[in-house]
Image (cartoon, grey):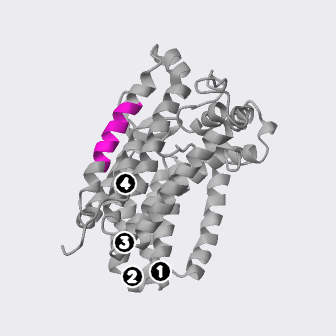
Amino acid sequence: MGKARSAPDIWIIIPTLLLLTIGVIMVYSASSVLAFREFGDSFYYLKRQLIFAVLGIVAMFFTMNVDYLVWKRFAKLALIICFGMLVIVLIPGIGVIRGGARSWLGIGAFGIQPSEFMKIGMILFLSKMLSENQSKITTLTKGLMPPLGIMGLAFGLIMLQPDLGTGVVLVGASLLIIYTAGARLLHLSYLGMIGVAGFVGLVIAAPYRLKRITAFLDPWQDPLGAGYQSIQSLYAIGPGGLVGLGLGMSRQKYSYLPEPQTDFIFSIIGEELGFIGGSLVLLLFTILVWRGMRAAITAPDTFASLIAVGIIGMIAVQVIINIGVVIGMFPVTGITLPFISAGGSSLTLMLTSVGILLNISRYSR
């Protein structure tokens, strides 16, 4: 194909594997009490996390060695399949409800989240679409509206589940790709105002979302209801201090903090490993984002550059939202911390995406 290929960026691999290792350790620490109470097996979530971690690493090394241009041929098909799964999951009797959202397909404890597949499917498709039509992106109707329309349709289907957190990550990563492709900031600003108005409408239309917003502003107004998760999260982080209470010594995991192994695992990290442990996690994410953006800047073509921006944008937006929720800066949205939180679809697809990023880094100029 005429491109010189080198070794993948080791500074993408190292933080990814370190975050994954921290995640496996903290999933066990955070979930052991809950797992023993629900399943009679303290290692239940740990064993699942190890299975998906191994699958994810295999997928990462596979995609690392597959030329990124392959995804250009399958981007449209992948998006169609993702849309199909988003529709199927909404059908009663087929889609499985967990955590109040009909967002899973599967049987029993094993299932997949179509919205997770849509995130990477959207990144690949928008990268293909915009790299082939970059000259039109500065026009509103022919250049900007088509990708925004596709993104909006996916967001709408995800909101029907409803899953606001995943929807926001999808929109955030998509907008980064569109902006990087050359969209005019003025056009995006106008559309952003329309989006904010629509978001306000979504919040007003669903009373539970309005409660989450008010609980975020002052969780102590409803300490046993909408503000409960935020308060318990802060109760976990506060006592952690500089060095933490010690690995495995969390108090909040004893049925006080909901979802300690998924959405609020960073609270347990803060409680057990303290400010130093939390800062280490943030440092690893910062290195990963930095090297990912470097891969985007030095990518051999526009398609590769946009994919890299999308993948790093997806990771960064998800990290910002998750940690923002945990420390009380954002309303509770129900979203995992990449590579660290317990989860099958999210973990495997994140590692698969990093593999694509690593392949792009192999062709850096």
Q: Which residue is mark 4?
A: 353
Q: CA distance from mark 3 to mark 2?
A: 16 Å
In front: label 2 or label 4? 4
In front: label 3 or label 1? 3
N-terminal of the pair, mark 3 or mark 2, is 2
Quadrant for the C terminus in the image: bottom left
* Residue plotted at (48% across, 43% down): 19
Q: Which residue is mark 3?
A: 299
Q: Is residue 147 above or below residue 52?
A: below
Nearer to us in this view, 119 or 46: 46
Q: Which residue is mark 2?
A: 134
N-terminal of the pair, mark 1 or mark 2, is 2
Q: Which residues are magenta?
A: 49-60
Residue type at the position of mark 3: Ala
Q: Residue furthest left?
A: 1
Majority secondary structure of the magenta segment? helix
Residue type at the position of mark 2: Gln
Instruction: Tell me where residue 252 appears, x and y as whole percent.
Output: 66, 26
N-terminal of the pair, mark 3 or mark 1, is 1
* Residue plotted at (42% across, 69% down): 296
Mark 2 lies on a secondary structure that is helix
Mark 3 lies on a secondary structure that is loop
Residue type at the position of mark 1: Gly
N-terminal of the pair, mark 2 or mark 4, is 2
Quadrant for the N terminus in the image: bottom left
Q: Are marks 3 and 4 in contact (CB under 8 Å)?
A: no
Q: Are marks 1 and 2 in contact (CB under 8 Å)?
A: yes
User: Looking at the image, can residue 325 be seen?
Assistant: yes
Q: Which residue is mark 1?
A: 182
Q: Is residue 108 above or below residue 40?
A: below
Instruction: Tell me where residue 357 appears, x and y as whole percent.
Output: 37, 60
